[in-house]
Every structure is written in C-alpha cells, then in structure tokens.
Image (cartoon, rainbow, N blue to C red):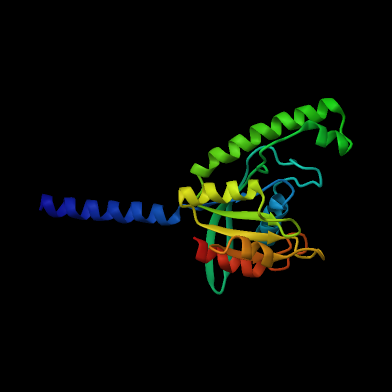
Amino acid sequence: MKKYFLKIKYAISGLFFSFLKKKRRIRLGIYGPPNAGKSTLANKITKDWMGEEFTKSSSIEHETREIATKENVEISSRGKKLSFNIIDTPGIATRIDYENFVKKGMNAKDSKQRAKEATKGVIEAIKWLDKVDAVLVVLDATKDPMDQVNITIIGNLEARGIPVVIVANKIDKKDASAQTIRDAFTQYEVVGISAKNGAGLDYLYEKLFGLI
C-alpha cells in the first residue's frame, strides 16, 4: 500500500513539474546593432498585443543602454498561442565614441556619460546571451549586412546554438533590400518588416512559433 501511495505521489509530482516547465515563458532576446530598430520592434509587439509600449527609442544611437524586459507577452497566429518575455537589449557595437553624440547635438559631458553607459550596456547584452531561449536579430535593411558587428552577433548565437530569426527592418525605405540580407545569411530565416508601420509583422509572428 505504501509503495502504491509513493508511486501516485511521484506521478503527481512529475505532472506538476512538467506543467511548470511547459508554463515557463520563453525568453525572447532582441539583438542587433545600434539604430537598427530593436526598441521600435519591441514596442510594436507589445503595442499590438498588450496595447502599450515599454521602452524608449530615438534617432540618436544607443538610446537603449540597459536591458529592458516585458513579461507575459502573449501572441497568437493561426489559432495557436505563445507566451514569452521580451528582452530588449542595447545595440551591439565594437567601438563607442562620445564624439559621435556631440555631432548629434549633445554636450560633451552628456556625450561622455552616454558613451560610458552604452559601453556597459553592450557588455550586459552579451552576458544575457546565456539567459535567452531564442533571438530576433534586427538588421537595418538599408545597410550592408556584412558588417563586423552583425557577423559577431550572429556568430555568437550560432556558437551557443540559440534559435535565430533575422529581421530585415526598414523595408518601407526606398533603398532597403531584405534580399541582400537573405543572400548574406543563407542559413537563417530572414523576415522583411517595417517596425515603424507594421508591414510584415503578421508573418514575423507566425515565424516565432517555428523559432520556438
């Protein structure tokens, strides 16, 4: 009788922990170089599904200098639902020069502080690669994708075996080319979107289910 009771107890415990495992929300990291549109995309997703934005975006590089998270985001596509936590990360850069901020109109003191915070943010974003379950790599479709930063980001993700979808952003611009990014990274799914006006977002949401 005691053995029978223990079997039931372990079976219930197994079901409980299996349930917890299934309910754990996917940690979806949004990575990419500065000004590719990461925060704009993060805000668009939460605006679409939660009715609110959660992070700042700006035309000046490195507006996002700390990890920003939004929990319990639930999307649906073709009758399926997916819950996850969004992690918006600072733009990855190999060199951050405060003089670039001065050229954008910021004073020297604020520019140096921004550069310091941005450098710290890049280090933190790289550390977070060990915490995410899947990643959207956001690239500017108006720029050459074979940039050292882009190659470094994607190489790090590949080395860790993290599932990736590359997002070719800003396809609303005349000189944008999602196909150029596809040709550069043929081993990955590339989805062309405009985080600004929402073009291609439905297809991206659909691809998230395959990514997970």
Residue 146: give x, y in percent of width and height.
66, 54
Q: Can I make out residue 154 in this image?
A: yes
Residue 192: give x, y in percent of width and height.
68, 66
**Placement of 136 over or under 124, stated as above or below:** below
Q: Can I make out residue 86 in this image?
A: no
- Asked if residue 158 lies left or right of residue 199, the reply is left
- Asked if residue 95 lies left or right of residue 190, the reply is right
Picture residue at 72% right of the left edge, 35% below the top: 96
Tally of numbered tags: 0
Residue at the far right: name it: 105
- Asked if residue 6 lies left or right of residue 37, the reply is left
- Asked if residue 110 lies left or right of residue 136, the reply is right
**Placement of 148 over or under 83, stated as above or below:** above
Specify the quadrant of the image occupied by residue 19.
bottom left
The one nearer the camera, 171 or 48, is 171
Residue 80: give x, y in percent of width and height.
52, 70
Picture residue at 58% right of the left edge, 70% below the top: 77
Residue 139: give x, y in percent of width and height.
68, 55
Residue at the far top: name it: 109
Residue at the far left: name it: 1
**Placement of 91 over or under 19, stated as above or below:** above
Residue at the far bottom: name it: 78
Picture residue at 49% right of the left edge, 42% below the top: 130
